[in-house]
Structure formats: structure tokens, C-alpha cells
Amino acid sequence: MIDKRLFKLPKAKIMLAMLAGLMFLQAFAILGQGIFLARAIVGSWKRQSFANIAEDVLTFLIFYLLRQGINWFQKWYMNRYANQTTALLRQQLLNKTYNGGIALVSRIGTGNLVSTLLDGMDEISNYLSLIFPKLIALAIVPWVILIYIFTLNALSGWILLLVFPLLILFMIILGTAAQSKASKQYAGYIKLQNHFVDALRGLSTLKVLGLAKKYGNIVYKNSENYRKKTMGVLRVAILSTFTLDFFTTLSIAMIAMFLGIGLINGNLLLYPSLVILILSPEYFLPIRDFGNDFHATLNGKNALGQIFDILVFPTTPQENQLSSFTWNKDSVFIANNVSFNYSHIDQDHFSVNKNAKMSAVVKKEQTSADKTHTADELRNVNLKLTGFQKVGIIGPTGAGKTTLMRILAGFLTPHLKEDNFTINGQNLAQLNQKNWQNQITYIPQDPFMFATSIKENLTFYNPNASQKEIDTALKATDLNNFVASLKDGLNTRIGENGRGISGGQKQRIALARAFLAKDRKILFFDEPTAHLDIETEYELKEPMKKLMENHLVFFTTHRLHWLNDMDWCLVIENGEIVEQGAPSDLAKNGTLFKKLTQPLKEDLL
């Protein structure tokens, strides 16, 4: 029930040694508290004066304050440790996300990743601050108390000793059931998050296609499923708490009965009997606290397990195997039987922790969610391009267009073999190459805008761009009038991801970025006009065509009028390039091409 990877956290051994020392002190404080409280009560029972029992009362107060002081220090120390560890994990997760890029985010899910970095970290901090103290207390405190009780009354000691394994057994059985249900609940939570984020991202498109209500029903069903799984976790947690309370109460009642009989028969004295009765609830307190906190921190446990799995996710570091070059009219690019699927990434990832049932459940949920927007594989991609060709990539939704684009841009790593790609005669296994990516400009459906000035957004690829170059880019993308209308002009700050500007203005800024990136001769357009209305797209078409001059261009789109401006076309279906050639040739001979482009047939001919 405890993830062994917990003990590999930074400074975990030092922290455990500190807790062990504190728990031994606390155990002796509990003993002193029980002993001197019993002595004071027995003195009062014998009608001794307060002066005679004052020393016992004062000593009891000292042990009581010592115990409270230890508790306070332990909470302070563990809160500090949890906060420091959580901050480190957050930094490691951010670094991993940066290095893993699209490959990692596609597998984990954006909604899950954001929730883990925000709410999940609070859950983890709570989990770390509670689980270690409870675990160490369970391993030390009951046994110190039990040894002392055996010295007072062997029968009471045996009752306590025999009940304890029974409690452990029930806690394991119910805890395993709770863990299983909590894992399914957490997986449902992840699925809900990912669907919700997808719905927000594509809300405008869903409305245009008339699918908003249908997708809303999907989110509702996921939320209902999550609610039912949450109630299932609560039922098991309540049953577990009832079981612990029932058996601890029953065992204390049995001890009280035998002690009472012994007192009546004169076989026992009041003082040791009273000490045993005071210490018996303290004996069971650590296991009850552990059981209660175990259920209270299940979300934190699951979130931490998810982070451990993400941190061992295999990533391909950027390489520097490709010689420095600038793409020109004589450059040659070849893709040679390139294949890719997400399953080989998952196998490498989740084989690291074969016993992590949580990972398997989450993986299943994530895979089903990811397949709604990302092709699962590409097979035997063969491609040869020369110079400044404009390549259109078309196909049904989910065919693999975006996956192909991401592989060609170096964001995803295909099945590795030495000659997957050849650039100007040099063989490469993958395209996450510094010199290749220094040549590309990537313009997606929704280009990201930084929460800074328009000027800094424009000069992202070329921070040293002159004012004349910026003015030329503004004019080319018809942004000059918009910028001139702003009070602060280019120094106007926009919100994160373009808050305060329209979708068309974001695309114009992205195009202006590309105009300023003069040294980058490879353009990736991943459905750049998908979220724009026809009028805005028409306005942007001319500056986009001008930008594409003297560039190698990869252009995926569902708006097939762009094919009139392409030199070459790739038609993808079910992860394979089924047809490729000049659009005019495919219009005559391409079966799937004809099916997809029937409305444009006359124009292409």
C-alpha cells in the first residue's frame, strides 16, 4: 500500500531518521503521561491532599507539554520537508515536460498535466506531510507501549498483541479495495480533465460543426462516472474506519472487563490497571490515524505515483548530428520507410514500474482520450522533397496528418533506425536535431502568444530584428493599421496566449514572426486557418502565399482550396501515405484524393 519510490525522495533517509527519533521520544512521553496521570488519579481516589499529588500532576503536565511540543515540531518539520520536496518535484516535472514536449503531453494529457502541476501538488504536499509520520509512529509507538503493558499485566498484553494483526489484516484488505477504487476514480478524473480541456480548446469548432451539445453530453457522462467512482471510494473508506473503531473498542472493552474482574477478585491493583486502561487507546491510536489518513491522502498518493511515472517517461534529447546548413533550392530531404506509434513509447514508459497498477489504469483512460484527436500510428512513410517545394498534406480526421507534421518537425521520435531520414546526403535516425529545428518555423491552429508586448511576440525567432524589418513584416501581414490604432503601439502588452486580441490577429502575429525569421527556410503550417472564418482566412491568404515563397512548406489543412497553391500533395489514410504527387495529377488518378477534393475537381483540372 506504500509506494517504495517514496523512500527514494531527496533527503528521505535523513527525514526518516529524524522522525524515528521523535517517535521514540513521543512514545516515552505517552508512557510518562499515562503513568503520572494514573498516579494522580489513584492518589485522589485514596483522598490524598493536593500537595501529595501535586508532583504527579506537574510531571504529567510536563510529559503532556513534551508530547504536544514533539507533535508541533514534527508537523512543522514535515510541512517544510513536504513543501521543499513538492517544489523540487514541480521543477522536475516542468523540466520533463519541456524536454518531453509534444510526445509527453500527448501521452499524459494536457488537462491531467495542468491539474497535477496545480491541485495535484497540494495533494502531494498533504500526502508527504502525513504519510511518513503516521508510518513511523505505527512502527514504533505501539510496540514501546505494548512492552510496558506486558510488564504490568501479561493477559492485557496478549489481548492487545493478538488484536493488532487482525486490524492490520482488515486494513490491508479494505485498503487494497480502497486503493483499487481510488485508482479508477483518479483515472476517471484524468479522463474528465482531458475531455474538458479538449472541449474548451475546440469550442468554436464544435459550435460551427453543431457538435457542442453532443460533446457536452460526453463531458457530463464523464463527470457522472467520476461522481459514482468517488462515492464508491467513500463507501470503502467509511467501512474501513468503522472496522478499525469496532475492533479497537471491542479489544479495550475486553481488557477493561478482565481488569475489572481482577480488581473485584483482588488479583490486581488499581494503579497498574488504570495505567493499562489509559495506555490501551494510545496503543491503537497510530493504526487508527494511519488508516484514516491513508484514505484522506489517496489522491495525493495517486498524483505522486503519476509524477513518478512521468519523470521516467523516455524522452529523446536534442542531438547535434546534422551538420550546419541552410535549406536552399538544391537541398534534398528523404524519409525512408518511417514508422511511428505511441504504443512503443508506452511500453518503454510503463515497463519501468510493472507493478504500478495505477499507471495501467491511467494509461488506458489516456489512450482512449488521446485517440479522439491524435492518430495512433504512422506506417512506412516514404517521401523525397527538393528545394522550395510546397507540400500539402490532406486526409480524413485522425488519419495522422498532425502526427506526421510533428515527426518531420522533430517533436516526435519514430522507430529508430539509422536511415529514417536523409538530409543533403546525411543519414539521421530522428529530426530532433538542433540545426534542423533552427531552420523551421511552426505555425499551428492556435499559435501561442506570450504575456508580454506585441513587439516581443513578433521578434520571438529574431530578437535582434530592426525596426525597418518589423515594419516590413507588419505591412506584409496587414498588421500595421492595427498596431497604429493602439495607444502604446508595438509596446502594447497582451495577455497570456493572446488575451485581448482576436484569433485573426494572433495568426497575423504568428505570420509576422515567420516573416522576421529570415534565416529559417522551412515552414510548417498545421491547419493554420482551422479556427478562422472564411473572410479572415481570405484576408490572410495573400500574406501567407507571399511568406511561402522561397521556403520548403508543409501545409496540413481541411480547407482544400489551399491545394491550388501546392506543388506536391500527400494523401494520408489510417496512418499511411496512400497517394502522393502533384495535385493536378492526383485529381486525374488519385482515388482518395478525388473523394476528398470532389468540390474542387474542376478548378484543379
Image: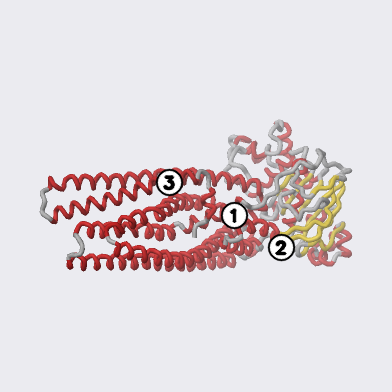
Q: Nearer the viewer, residue 535 or 496?
A: 496
Q: Which residue is mark 2?
A: 397
Q: Nearer the viewer, residue 141 or 527?
A: 141
| Residue 240, above or below 8 | below
Front disc: 1 or 2: 1
Residue 591 visible in image: yes
Residue 471 pos. (x, y %): 71, 35
Residue 193 pos. (x, y %): 55, 59
Residue type, numbered disc 2? Thr
| Residue 472, above or below 50 | above
* Mark positioned earlier in the residue sequence (1 or 2): 1
Q: Residues within 10 Å of mark 2 (few under 14, many from 20)?
A: some
Residue type, numbered disc 3? Met
Callout 2 secondary element: loop
**Distance of mark 2 from mark 3, alpha carbons?**
50 Å
Residue 261 pos. (x, y %): 21, 68
Quadrant of the rendered image containing residue 160: bottom left
* Mark positioned earlier in the residue sequence (1 or 3): 3
Q: Which residue is mark 3?
A: 78
* Mark positioned earlier in the residue sequence (2 or 3): 3
Q: Residues within 10 Å of mark 3 (few under 14, many from 20)?
A: many
